[in-house]
Image: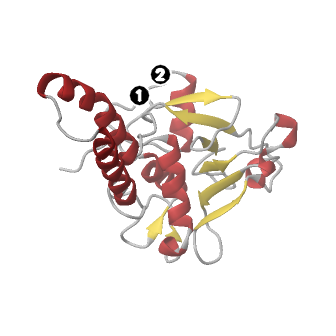
């Protein structure tokens, strides 16, 4: 059975979002309620259709249905906001945007005539010195929306400023997924740290005959191999 959570850092969420916004995701179209069959899929949809929050879930590494999600079992924009306002089991509201955070707004009279469905996106870039008066237009985001043609695109965040076509304010929110893990250390750095830490202890216990410079060259060669393989 596919895991419900894929350990993902904020930086990896940005990478996944940008990958889907590139050539690989060009064939995905918008459909409400579609997408994110598995967080381990290479793209957010295997059927060619996806919606906004299912795309965000895929990028962030958790399935859009969670048994322990306090705001109801399905993760969508309204539920994410409710969770951030109360239980905070998956989301915490932030005032300062960061790459990998969600930028969302909620629904208004969802399912009713002239109602509005909420929307979500992944923040990919924040300009230095950003302040609220600059607006969300200054941000770069990846969103899955009912564009003409491909659904997943990198855009500015202007869609989250102001109001909808009927004049209702978006009241957009910045949410940080609490399930993000620390950014993984590059493999070559891990190998280097391991060698640097273990080699002195091994020498002390067993001794390493030969030229110290030769040992240093051997360590450097292993580190270089690890970096090329990363």
Determine which quarter of the picture holds residue 85. Answer: top right
**Residue name at image x 53 percent, y 57 percent:** 17
Q: Indicate the colouring scheme.
A: secondary structure
Q: Is residue 222 left or right of residue 114?
A: left
**Looking at the rendering, in which quadrant would you find the C terminus?**
bottom left
Q: Which mark is residue 111?
A: none
Expressed as whole percent of the image width and height from the top left, the position of residue 107 reads: 63, 44
Between the C-alphas of marks 1 and 2, the distance is 6 Å
Expressed as whole percent of the image width and height from the top left, the position of residue 71 reads: 45, 31
Please name whichever residue, 39 or 22, is drawn nearer the observer in this view of the structure. Answer: 22
Crowding at label 1, few (<14), some or many (≥20) Cα neighbours within 10 Å? Answer: some
| Mark 1 vs 2, N-terminal side | 1
Q: Is residue 147 left or right of residue 171?
A: left
Marks 1/2 in contact by CB < 8 Å: the verdict is yes
Q: List the single residue furthest toward the left.
A: 206
**Residue name at image x 46 percent, y 38 percent:** 183
Say whether residue 123 is visible.
yes
**Residue name at image x 69 percent, y 55 percent:** 114
Expressed as whole percent of the image width and height from the top left, the position of residue 129 reads: 81, 37
Crowding at label 2, few (<14), some or many (≥20) Cα neighbours within 10 Å? Answer: few
Q: Which mark is residue 70?
A: 1
Q: List the single residue furthest toward the front.
A: 211
Say whether residue 62 is visible.
no
Q: Disc 2 designates what residue? A: 87
Residue 192 vertical placement versus 53 (above, below): above
Expressed as whole percent of the image width and height from the top left, the position of residue 31 reads: 50, 66
Q: Secondary structure at mark 2?
A: loop
């Amino acid at each position: 059975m596919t895991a419900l959570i894929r350990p993902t850092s904020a930086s990896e969420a940005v990478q996944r979002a940008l990958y889907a916004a590139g050539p690989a995701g060009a064939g995905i179209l918008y459909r409400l309620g579609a997408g994110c069959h598995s967080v381990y899929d290479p793209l957010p949809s295997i059927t060619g259709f996806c919606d906004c929050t299912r795309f965000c879930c895929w990028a962030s590494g958790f399935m859009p249905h969670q048994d322990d999600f306090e705001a109801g079992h399905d993760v969508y924009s309204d539920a994410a906001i409710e969770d951030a306002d109360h239980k905070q089991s998956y989301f915490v509201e932030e005032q300062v945007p960061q790459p990998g955070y969600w930028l969302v707004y909620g629904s208004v009279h969802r399912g009713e005539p002239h109602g509005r469905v909420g929307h979500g996106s992944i923040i990919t870039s924040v300009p230095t010195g950003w302040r609220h008066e600059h607006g969300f237009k200054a941000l770069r985001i990846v969103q899955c929306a009912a564009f003409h043609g491909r659904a997943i695109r990198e855009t500015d965040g202007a869609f989250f400023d102001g109001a909808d076509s009927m004049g209702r304010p978006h009241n957009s929110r910045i949410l940080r997924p609490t399930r993000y893990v620390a950014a993984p250390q590059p493999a070559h750095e891990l190998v280097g740290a391991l060698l640097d830490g273990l080699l002195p202890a091994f020498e002390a216990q067993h001794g390493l005959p030969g030229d110290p410079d030769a040992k240093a060259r051997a360590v450097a060669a292993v580190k270089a191999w690890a970096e090329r393989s990363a």
